[in-house]
């Protein structure tokens, strides 16, 4: 095999899928791809060989190549991963804010109850109750707003799961170098209602 040829099935480090003799395939690389191939380490070459095997199996089963070019799929997977991270961070922030506002709401309600016990200071109590009612109304309004935001981000994550999960096995090889991304993809697509 020349330096500009890339091995397919039966590359080093791979086990035979069938009991028969292994078939060896090669592809001719463009000059640019040949330079990149020459700079890859053994693990990178094995991963690309595995991807080539998956493309061969895909083509054998479906009779067609993936709709999008690999470069588009890789760019999309990076974009989706970044979007997923942003959604998770926003959701976490919104949940923390909802918890904080819930505590504030309980504090305000407790203060309101305490204020009603101060009958001897009726004038001060009335002013404090009015102020606390305004704070309560604001807190309830903010709480509803953050609940809406939490639901919004949950819906976004659900839509993201609907988009990604049917293609989970295709995406995992593309993000394999990031174990965290693989784990998060698997967690996102874990069947609901089943024990982890």
Image (tube, grey):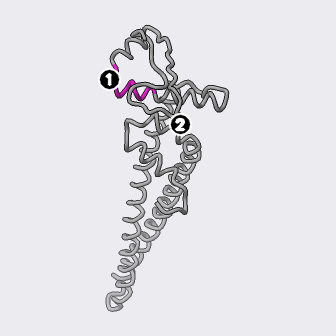
Residue 43 is one of the magenta-drawn residues: yes
Magenta residues, start to end: 40-49
Q: In the rendered image, which quarter is residue 163 located in?
A: top right
Mark 1 lies on a secondary structure that is loop
Question: Depth check: 85 or 176 in front?
Answer: 176
Q: Please state which of the two labelled residues, at mark 2 or mark 1, is closer to the viewer.
A: 1
Q: Which labelled disc corresponds to residue 184?
A: none
Q: Is residue 52 left or right of residue 67?
A: left
Give the secondary structure at mark 2. Answer: helix
Name the spot of residue 124 as percent of width and height, x first. Answer: 33, 81
Residue receiving disc 1: 41
Task: Identify the residue at image location x=46%, y=41%.
Answer: 83
Q: Residue at x 52, y 34 (%)?
A: 19
On the image, numbered disc 2 is attached to which residue?
170
Provide residue 69's location: percent of width, then percent of height.
56, 24
Q: Is residue 60 magenta?
A: no
């Amino acid at each position: 095999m020349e330096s500009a040829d890339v091995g397919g099935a039966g590359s080093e480090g791979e086990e035979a899928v069938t009991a028969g003799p292994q078939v060896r395939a090669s592809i001719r690389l463009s000059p640019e791809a040949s330079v990149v191939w020459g700079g890859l380490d053994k693990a990178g070459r094995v991963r690309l060989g595995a991807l080539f095997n998956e493309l061969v199996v895909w083509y054998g089963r479906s009779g067609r190549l993936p709709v999008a070019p690999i470069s588009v799929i890789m760019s999309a997977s990076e974009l989706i991963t970044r979007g997923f991270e942003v959604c998770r961070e926003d959701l976490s922030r919104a949940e923390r804010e909802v918890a904080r506002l819930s505590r504030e709401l309980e504090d305000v309600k407790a203060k309101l109850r305490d204020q009603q016990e101060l009958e001897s200071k009726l004038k001060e109590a009335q002013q404090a109750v009015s102020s606390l009612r305004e704070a309560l109304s604001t807190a309830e309004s903010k709480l509803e707003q953050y609940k809406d935001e939490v639901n919004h981000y949950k819906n976004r994550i659900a839509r993201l799961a609907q988009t990604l999960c049917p293609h989970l096995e295709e995406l995992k090889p593309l993000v394999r170098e990031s174990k965290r991304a693989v784990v998060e993809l698997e967690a996102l697509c874990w069947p609901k209602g089943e024990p982890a």
